[in-house]
Image (cartoon, rainbow, N blue to C red):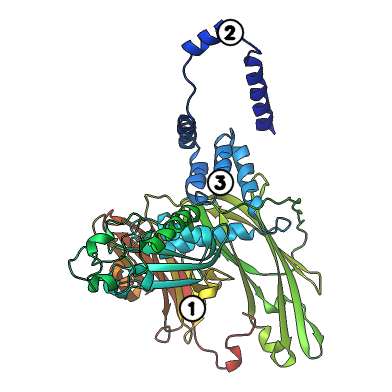
């Protein structure tokens, strides 16, 4: 409101500075002596320069939010409005409103749009890095704006390729390329196919409008000829004299038909990089929940994984012993329900994130006793900025009205761009690939893997030890487009070293600035007892080293088979 009043006053001042009328001679003299008004182009250039200066002067967290977190989805009007804010309090309010305006359900605590946006950034960094973070690549940008394509035709090594008819037909050899097809893109159309080509053979795919750019034999005489070129009805030289922006061979339908698609290609290329439209919605007040009793005992943990330099993914995992549930029996089935509410707030009391869910358990008579020895586990992943927060978790049992409460300090670490760093180390009882349509969706899912933490970090000898860890900011060589990473995994028991493995980035097939370690370690050869796991990463280029470690317990297999994996976990 303060800025709205300021703008009105400036406009009013402008009105009073304009004279109502001038004598003819005075007006002519003023016209002759004054500087000609700036053209529209000059005005835009001046405006761009002014906003660029304001952007450089932004405090670091807000500059990174603008230039990294939302750079692909913020509109020009929003960017300009944000740059004209004067205080950090106003910027915080703007950011909160920015996400709420995009929320499909603004009357609920969750913001599905924000969660999906940061999930896409994390996925892009995991899968599209190539000498630079994945979010900065063309594939990363398209994925962040438009999400997962409906179809992907991938040619990761290039090689033999039969051109379709509209690209001239005939066989050739190609650079690595991918074609992404979206059945529908809002504001663009249906069945949109985007092509990315890696002409440098280094993993650096870029979006192209030219279907001929992937042809590796385009400049090789008498190789990779099209149908017309083989018949002598066209020459390779004709490819490079086309006026429609393509260097593909001319098809038998002629250039006119292809020229018709040039406008479509240019239009699509321009629109796919534009921020998605914002659907403005009215906002309701967020209900504040009071925390009262503490009668349900449960455990919890939170992990930290970098999304951008200023945004961290924080999976919050909650584990409830099934014996803490109050079951009611009906028709031979025992049912219990716990309502979950959690809130993340700043130390000044400002609510940053909230989420609610229902945890329900149903067990038949025959499994109830066994199931009461197991646990129920739940996870919610939140994107947060580095900083110190308060985490409140409240559980309420519907049958007994018992309540469980946790108030915890949540210190989200920063991830500097120039410093070798790492996520938290997760020891898991499950690490498995997820279906393509479930990538990044649901509990325990990190990218294309399901990683379920083992909160007590105790494993039986017939269970594998799951390890998940991300390392960030390896230096990538400018010439090879590869890192020079060395990863050492070591297990000790007391002073005795049990196992040690050392691998390079090439061996791990992880050559970008981010390296992800995920593995299942058999424990059948481990005697019951306490162990220590350490994973150390060294960047041989920058000579930086970082490590993460954790203790874990190996237990013998119980004599009774009834103690095997209890339902409900």
Q: Give the label, 3 or 2, closer to the camera.
A: 2
Question: Could you give the CA–CA distance between mark 3 and mark 2, rounded to whole angstroms?
Answer: 45 Å
- In depth, the one of 417 and 402 nearer the eye is 417
Mark in front: 1 vs 3: 3
Indicate the quadrant where residue 532 lies: bottom left
> What residue is shown with label 2?
24
N-terminal of the pair, mark 3 or mark 2, is 2
Q: Is residue 127 left or right of residue 204?
A: right
Classed neighbour count for the residue bearing mark 3: other residues with Cα under 10 Å, few (<14), some (14–19), many (≥20): some
x, y percent for residue 139: 42, 61
**Image-based side of 11 in relation to 292, left or right:** left
Residue 11 rendering spot, x and y as whole percentages: 65, 24
Of the image marks 1 and 3, the number of the one nearer the N terminus = 3
Quadrant where the image shows the C terminus: bottom right
In-front residue for pair 443/565: 443
Q: Which residue is denoted by mark 1 in the rendering?
A: 432
For mark 1, give the secondary structure.
strand
511 relative to 46 in the view: left or right: left
Q: Which residue is at a point 50% across and 86% down the rendered structure image? A: 556
Name the side, left or right, on which 319 lies relative to 173: right
Residue identifier under label 3: 75
């Amino acid at each position: 409101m303060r800025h709205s009043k300021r703008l009105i006053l400036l406009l009013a001042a402008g009105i009073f500075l304009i004279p109502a009328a001038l004598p003819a001679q005075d007006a002519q003299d003023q016209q002759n002596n004054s500087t000609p008004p700036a053209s529209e182009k000059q005005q835009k250039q001046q405006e761009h320069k002014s906003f660029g200066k304001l952007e450089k002067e932004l405090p670091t967290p807000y500059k990174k939010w603008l230039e990294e977190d939302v750079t692909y989805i913020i509109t020009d009007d929003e960017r300009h409005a944000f740059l004209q804010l004067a205080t950090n309090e106003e910027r915080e309010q703007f950011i909160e409103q920015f996400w709420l305006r995009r929320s499909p359900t603004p009357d609920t605590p969750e913001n599905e749009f924000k969660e999906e946006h940061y999930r896409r950034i994390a996925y892009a960094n995991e899968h599209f890095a190539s000498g630079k973070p994945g979010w900065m690549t063309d594939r990363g940008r398209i994925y962040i704006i438009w999400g997962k394509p409906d179809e992907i035709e991938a040619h990761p090594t290039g090689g033999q390729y039969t051109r379709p008819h509209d690209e001239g037909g005939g066989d050739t050899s190609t650079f690595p390329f991918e074609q992404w097809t979206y059945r529908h893109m809002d504001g663009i159309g249906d069945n949109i196919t985007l092509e990315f080509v890696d002409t440098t053979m280094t993993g650096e795919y870029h979006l192209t409008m030219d279907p001929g750019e992937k042809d590796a034999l385009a400049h090789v005489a008498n190789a990779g000829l099209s149908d017309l070129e083989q018949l002598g009805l066209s020459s390779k030289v004709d490819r490079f004299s086309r006026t429609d922006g393509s260097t593909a061979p001319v098809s038998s339908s002629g250039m006119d038909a292809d020229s018709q698609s040039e406008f479509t290609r240019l239009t699509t290329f321009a629109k796919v990089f534009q921020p998605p439209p914002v659907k403005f919605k009215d906002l309701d007040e967020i209900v504040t929940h009071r925390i009262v009793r503490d009668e349900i005992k449960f455990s919890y943990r939170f992990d930290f994984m970098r999304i951008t330099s200023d945004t961290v993914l924080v999976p919050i995992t909650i584990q409830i012993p099934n014996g803490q549930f109050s079951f009611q029996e009906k028709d031979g089935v025992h049912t219990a329900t716990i309502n979950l509410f959690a809130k993340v707030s700043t130390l000044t009391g400002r609510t940053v994130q909230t989420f609610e869910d229902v945890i329900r358990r149903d067990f038949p008579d025959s499994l109830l006793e066994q199931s009461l020895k197991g646990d129920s586990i739940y996870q919610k992943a939140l994107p947060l900025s580095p900083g110190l927060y308060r985490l409140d978790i409240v559980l309420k049992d519907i049958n007994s009205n018992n309540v469980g409460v946790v108030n915890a300090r949540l210190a989200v670490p920063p991830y500097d761009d120039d410093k070798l760093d790492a996520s938290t180390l997760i020891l898991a009882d499950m690490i498995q690939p997820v279906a393509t349509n479930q990538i990044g969706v649901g509990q325990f899912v990190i990218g294309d893997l399901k990683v379920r933490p083992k909160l007590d970090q105790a494993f039986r000898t017939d269970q594998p030890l799951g390890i998940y860890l991300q390392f960030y900011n390896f230096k990538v060589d400018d010439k090879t487009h590869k890192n020079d990473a060395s990863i050492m995994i070591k297990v000790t028991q007391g002073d005795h070293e049990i196992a040690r493995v050392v691998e390079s980035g090439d061996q791990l097939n992880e050559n970008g600035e981010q390296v992800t370690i995920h593995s299942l370690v058999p424990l059948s050869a481990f005697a019951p007892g306490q162990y220590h796991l350490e994973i150390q990463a060294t960047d041989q280029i920058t000579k930086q080293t970082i490590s993460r470690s954790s203790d874990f317990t190996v237990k013998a297999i119980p004599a009774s088979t009834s103690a095997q994996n209890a339902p409900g976990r």
